[in-house]
Amino acid sequence: MTDPARNLIEALSQVHDLWSAHRVVSVNDYDVKVVKVQGEFVWHTHPETDELFLVMSGRLTIQLRDGDVELGPNDVYVVPRGVEHCPRADEETHVVLVEPRGTVNTGDAGGDRTVEVRELA
Amino acid sequence: MTDPARNLIEALSQVHDLWSAHRVVSVNDYDVKVVKVQGEFVWHTHPETDELFLVMSGRLTIQLRDGDVELGPNDVYVVPRGVEHCPRADEETHVVLVEPRGTVNTGDAGGDRTVEVRELA
């Protein structure tokens, strides 16, 4: 029996908390996760890895110390490892993340916005 | 100066050959590529890596030896390493691939369908 494909929109419909990434599939040791965001996150860095953002719906601003990157639907951006960033969304925005398993959402900043990646039911 | 985001639909609009993957961005040593497909590819295996397919438009059938996986828009499927597969699309279908840099499109099969990954202009 072959596993069926997973739909990213359907996966997002199962996510009810903001800023809580849920794993959909993995490619080797990289996770593909979906997350709903609104408001501003925290400034942080992933010293050991790049981080890919793909917007499915809404608008995402990735604030960087030398300027903002604006993403709309089907826009993709990779924050290079070691680059400080702070995502922000004025409206509820649905995002796909691709990064190595074990990447912590708050990177080196830690704090109370840190949450574990969850599995979709 | 910050690089802008890349749009996957716009990237696909720059692809004019079928079955020719074009790199859009990279995450560490993984490439995110876009490819237009129609017709049937060749049966092959990637012994060393999983391979992620995400359909942007159209319909993709990933034939496996124990059954087909059907993908429509926003559907994602990961062919595990070592699993023989043969993609097929009855209509022109636009796909995003995520896999390690250097992954050969025809895997262990080789042959005249083998092409290098291209860079978008």
Image: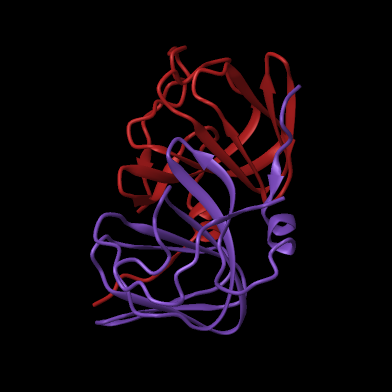
Chain colours: A purple, B red
The spot of residue A116 in percent (x, y) is: 50, 60
User: Which of A27 and B41 lies nearest the eye of the viewer?
Assistant: A27
Say how many tags the image has: 0
Left or right position of B65 against A105 = right
Residue displayed at 52% across by 41% down: A26
The spot of residue A78 in percent (x, y) is: 37, 61
Query: Which quarter shows the C terminus of chain B?
Result: bottom left
Residue displayed at 44% across by 44% down: A30
Q: Quadrant of residue B61?
A: top right
User: Which of A18 and B75 lies nearest the eye of the viewer?
Assistant: A18
Give the answer, above or below, for where B103 lies relative to A23.
above
Left or right position of A74 against A8 = left
The spot of residue B44 in percent (x, y) is: 53, 16
User: Which of A50 and A68 lies nearest the eye of the viewer?
Assistant: A50
Give the answer, above or below, for where B43 lies relative to A104.
above
Left or right position of A48 against B11 = left
User: Which of B77 and A44 lies nearest the eye of the viewer?
Assistant: A44
The spot of residue A84 in percent (x, y) is: 28, 73
